[in-house]
Amino acid sequence: MEIKGIVTSGQGEGAYFMSLPIYKTQFKDKLNFTPFPGTLNLKIGEGEINAIHSIREDKMEIIKGEGKFGDVLLIKAVVNDTINGAIIFPKKTTHGESILEFIASKNLKEELGIKNGDFVKIALNY
């Protein structure tokens, strides 16, 4: 499945959560890399939202939260056919469904030379 989205600014929370040992360790175990402290946020349309809803949860991996930190579902993916990473779905989020978060080992805006307003594509591997 392929998802297209427009790069947009986040709320700055991704950097905080990606640096927490509870998440960082589990992401490394599941993805074989330590995530860059931040997420690439993509604004997606209704078609992409519907496509994501069609993915069964048993096709996703789970990162377990503790206490006030919620669980996170993930699907391995590739951005712009070049960089491996994952789409993450925090169980506790303030984004809403129209924002998708992608994690990788690198700062994707720098690595891909992209900025807010640019289109990217994500190929899901499930």
Image: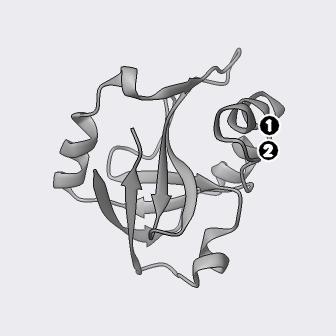
Image: 46 above or below 56: below
Q: Which residue is label 1 attached to?
A: 20
Q: CA distance from mark 2 to mark 1?
A: 4 Å
Left or right position of 106 against 5: right
Q: Amino acid at mark 1?
A: Leu
Looking at the image, the residue that sits furthest to the top is 67
Q: Which numbered disc covers residue 19?
A: 2
Residue 25: horizontal and vertical position, in percent? 79, 32
Colour logic: one colour
In the rendered image of this protein, does residue 1 appear above or below residue 27?
A: below
Q: Pointer 2 and pointer 1: residues touching (CB < 8 Å)?
A: yes
Q: Is residue 86 left or right of residue 52?
A: right
Residue at disc 1, secondary structure: loop
Whether residue 1 sits left or right of residue 84 in the image: it is left
| Amino acid beneath label 2 | Ser
The dot on residue 56 is: none
Foreground residue, 37 or 77? 77
Which residue appears farthest toward the right when viewing the image? 21
Q: Mark 2 falls on what kind of element? A: helix
Q: Name the one closer to the observer, 114 or 124.
A: 124
Quadrant assignment, res 105: bottom right
The residue positioned farthest toward the bottom in the image shown: 113
Q: Nearer the viewer, residue 25 or 97?
A: 25
Question: Above or below — where is 10 with respect to 124?
Answer: below
Instruction: Using the image, determine if residue 10 lies above or below residue 96.
Output: below
Residue 26, image x, y percentages: 72, 29
Residue at 28%, 50% in the rendered image: 1
Residue at position x 45%, y 70% from top? 80
Identity of the residue drawn at 38% across and 56% down: 123
